């Protein structure tokens, strides 16, 4: 499989820096299994679904994981160094140990202390092959979450962060309405950002069902693939959970002929990592590194609500697995021509295989 099959040119002005206002007023491109395309609006999503269909949301909560800190001078002749830190993955909750991306990484050494606030700091540990460093915070558990909430900003994706800083508005717009209490994600399940209270009410009135799963989203979800990942058929791991009650209800929906419609690729990956060859879902909790690409059969997904994804990414390969590469390349070309807005704060697709 050649990665170039999943490439496309995207003009930079198509990358959304802010969401639609209100967020349910984003555009919706409906892609049918025969290649037919319809232009619509997210608020009208119920028009393309059927009563009894079950929308499956990822209810993870985004952590304010972007931090600014200072590495104090190592001696009286040195200088303080300002550091930008993005948390990537929790390694040990009890010890407050995280992997993080830190800039400027070359100015940090194991044992250095980074100060983020009056009573909030971390020690730098060893660097990893992927460019991350270990950070051991001086607090853990709920105390760490409180410090992050007070000192952190929303971890906007790099294609937004390099053009503007996160601000107070992102605290609302980069968090889904269905987010639970457990803040462990360092990126949002962005398809869910479109679902306002108004849209959820319309879905309820149309007889659509709603379930939640949980997958803690890591930054690697959005990263471009390299040939090694494609060759090894492996992706990064992310923690996910499908509870027994939700699995049972979704299995009952399937038996009744009703569609299971993940909202976002993280919800889809959760379901597809918990399904057997016969299409039956089984409860599961723990890591998954599922990698879906053309040629793989999706057994738990009858339709998908998703945003527009990066070229040469595992997420674009995933939607090609569901719909076919030619159909998705044609759909994205149409979206670019018609001025759709791309990526995390952009417009949405409804994929109907």
Image (tube, rainbow, N blue to C red):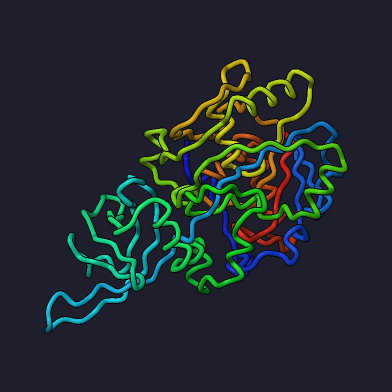
Q: Residue at x 36, y 69 (%)?
A: 84
- 54 lies above or below 157: above
**Along the viewing direction, whichever of 108 and 345 lies nearer the viewer:** 108
Is 105 situated left or right of 306 in this image? Answer: left
| 33, above or below 116, in the image | above
In this picture, residue 338 sits left or right of residue 127: right
In the rendered image, residue 222, in percent from the top left (x then y), is placed at: 50, 51
The answer to whether residue 135 is left or right of residue 50 is left
Whole-percent x and y of residue 142? 43, 53
Quarter residue 75 falls in? bottom left
Q: Quadrant of residue 55?
A: top right
Q: Please state the horizontal and vertical placement of residue 196, each as a whole percent of the image.
A: 74, 55
The outermost residue toward the top is 278
Residue at the (66%, 48%) spot, across then down: 178
Residue 221, image x, y percentages:
48, 47
Front residue of 336/78: it is 78
- Quarter of the figure that contains the C terminus: top right
């Amino acid at each position: 499989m050649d990665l170039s099959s999943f490439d496309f040119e995207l003009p930079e002005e198509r990358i959304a820096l802010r969401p639609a206002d209100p967020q349910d007023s984003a555009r919706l491109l409906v892609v049918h299994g025969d290649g037919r395309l319809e232009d619509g609006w997210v608020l009208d999503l119920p028009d393309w679904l059927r009563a009894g269909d079950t929308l499956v949301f990822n209810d993870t909560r985004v952590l304010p994981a972007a931090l600014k800190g200072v590495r104090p001078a190592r001696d009286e002749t040195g200088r303080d160094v300002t550091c930008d830190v993005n948390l990537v993955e929790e390694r040990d909750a009890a010890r407050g140990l995280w992997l993080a991306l830190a800039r400027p990484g070359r100015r940090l050494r194991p044992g250095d202390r980074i100060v983020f606030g009056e009573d909030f700091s971390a020690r730098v540990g060893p660097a990893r092959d992927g460019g991350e460093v270990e950070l051991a915070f001086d607090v853990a558990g709920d105390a760490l979450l409180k410090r992050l909430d007070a000192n952190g900003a929303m971890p906007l994706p790099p294609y937004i962060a390099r053009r503007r800083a996160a601000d107070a508005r992102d605290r609302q717009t980069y968090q889904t309405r269905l987010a639970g209490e457990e803040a462990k994600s360092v990126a949002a399940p962005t398809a869910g950002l479109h679902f306002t209270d108004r849209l959820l009410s319309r879905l309820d009135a149309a007889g659509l069902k709603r379930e939640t799963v949980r997958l803690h989203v890591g930054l690697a979800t959005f990263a471009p693939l390299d040939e090694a990942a494609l060759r090894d058929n492996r992706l990064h791991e992310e923690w996910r959970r499908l509870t027994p009650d939700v699995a049972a209800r979704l299995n009952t929906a399937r038996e009744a002929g009703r569609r299971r419609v993940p909202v976002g690729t993280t919800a889809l990956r959760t379901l597809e990592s918990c399904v057997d060859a016969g299409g039956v879902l089984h409860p599961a909790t723990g890591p998954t590194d599922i990698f879906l690409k053309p040629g793989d059969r999706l057994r738990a997904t009858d339709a998908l609500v998703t945003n527009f994804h990066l070229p040469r990414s595992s997420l674009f390969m995933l939607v090609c697995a569901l719909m076919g590469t030619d159909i998705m390349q044609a759909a994205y070309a149409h979206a670019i021509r018609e001025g759709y807005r791309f990526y995390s704060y952009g417009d949405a697709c409804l994929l109907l295989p």
